[in-house]
Image (cartoon, helix red, strand yellow):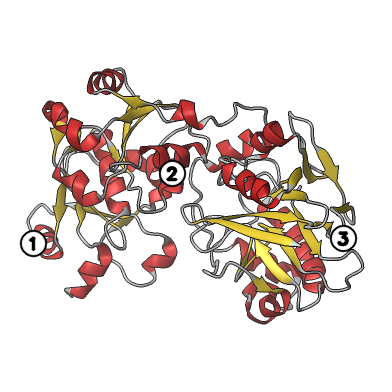
Amino acid sequence: MFFAQYYLDCLSQASYLIADETTGRAVVVDPRRDVDEYLADAEAYGFTVEAVLNTHFHADFLAGHLELAARTGAWIGYGRRAETEYPIRHLAEGERISLGEVTLEILETPGHTPESISVLVRERAEDAVPYGVLTGDALFIGDVGRPDLLASSGVTAEELGRMLYESVQGKLMALPDETRVFPAHGAGSACGKNLSTERSSTIGAQRATNYACAPMAEQDFVALVTAGQPAAPSYFGYDATLNRQERELFDAGRAHRPLTVAEFRAARAAGAVVVDARSPQEFAAGHLRGAVNIPADGRFAEQAGAVLTPQAELLVLAPECRAAEVTTRLARIGFDRTAGHLAEPEATLPELADLLTPASRLTADQLRTALAADQPPLMIDVRSCAERAEGTVEGALHIALNELPSRLAEIPTDRPVVLHCAGGHRSSIAASLLRRHGHTDVSDLLGGYAAWAATC
């Protein structure tokens, strides 16, 4: 058997290629939209991709089922409750997919979403102990999938929580302890609240260490898994809907379009949003007015989805030689309205000097002085609730980065504003967003709360 996990740190997202090495028949599970890596590996090993399985309608990224189907002729599989605009094969509990000796078996594991499935993988059809189980967003390492994302779509968090209880406690925990667990996400994903950095585990290990896998009553489980969930990025609903629909296929050649200075200037003047993917330090030294700083060295796609809208036309200003990467990462969450990127930015950005402006960043000592003044700035903490348990700046207003676009009206425009996060990355994003929306006196804290706490 061939079994490979493909992991995107930017989205904490895992996908899988599984094949029978004797027959060469293969499936891909939960693929991302840029599918070349799966196809290159399949070609290198002589595999034929016959099927694409999605464990559920993903909300945090745009899946690559349509791209793979178009390039391989593979059929697309979902759980039996799924409804789509494109042809799919509905997969029911206990259904087996034979690749030769290697056999996949479907487990219906609703709870994160109603149509969620898990996929048992056996090296031989008769094996009593499966090689592993691909759990999608039902069971993570150290956590389970959140049941609250569909609360506005006619299914309550409590209803899904009860489904998840049966899926995890009644079905997945009934598997042999030796069964390996391969989830769709790891630490950092907003699809749960306590995900581990480990990318695989076993049922036995999760039974012993995962808070949601300990024996408990249904009502206790539901209360536990619905409490303390982080705010989901605003693009989640958009992607969950788009994953059900026929849509345009990702075309790397079309997406990665270099622009001259004149073309870039004209598109910006026409209303396109500049996405500046340089570091906060480079951005602060000089950026195009109205640009939103989303550093490429970080959770770029998720953060872009939190502060931008998929309807906006985007212009990419990326670190040298990284424009194609940045554009692809936008496409992974369905942000396809990219007009292009500034060609050779280090050489050409000076030609836009009339549009450049610096950004204010304060040290912890400078912030203390400002807070002691007669008219202190408004402090805004853009960390998550869990991070705030480590300590806070007294008097700071808490607006997590994912919530900021919907709460801009709460922030006054007639007083200075200083934002902080844990280390200075998210605060630069937040500060740039406020400037774009008309706030003129905005700073962020160099080094974030870590720097503040170190000087206490």
Quarter of the image containing the C terminus?
A: bottom left
The secondary element bearing badge 1 is classed as helix
For the point 58% across and 38% down, the residue is 239
Q: CA distance from mark 1 to mark 2?
A: 32 Å
Q: Is residue 404 left or right of residue 187?
A: left
Choose between 433 and 188: the one closer to the eye. Answer: 188
Q: Which residue is mark 3?
A: 101
- Kind of residue sitting beneath label 3: Glu
- Which one is in front in this view, the residue at disc 3 or the one at disc 1? 3
The secondary element bearing badge 3 is classed as loop
Q: Residues within 10 Å of mark 3 (few under 14, many from 20)?
A: some
First in sequence: mark 1 vs mark 2: 2
Q: Is residue 79 left or right of residue 406?
A: right
Q: Position of residue 337 (x, y in %)?
A: 45, 27
First in sequence: mark 3 vs mark 1: 3
The secondary element bearing badge 2 is classed as helix
- Kind of residue sitting beneath label 1: Thr
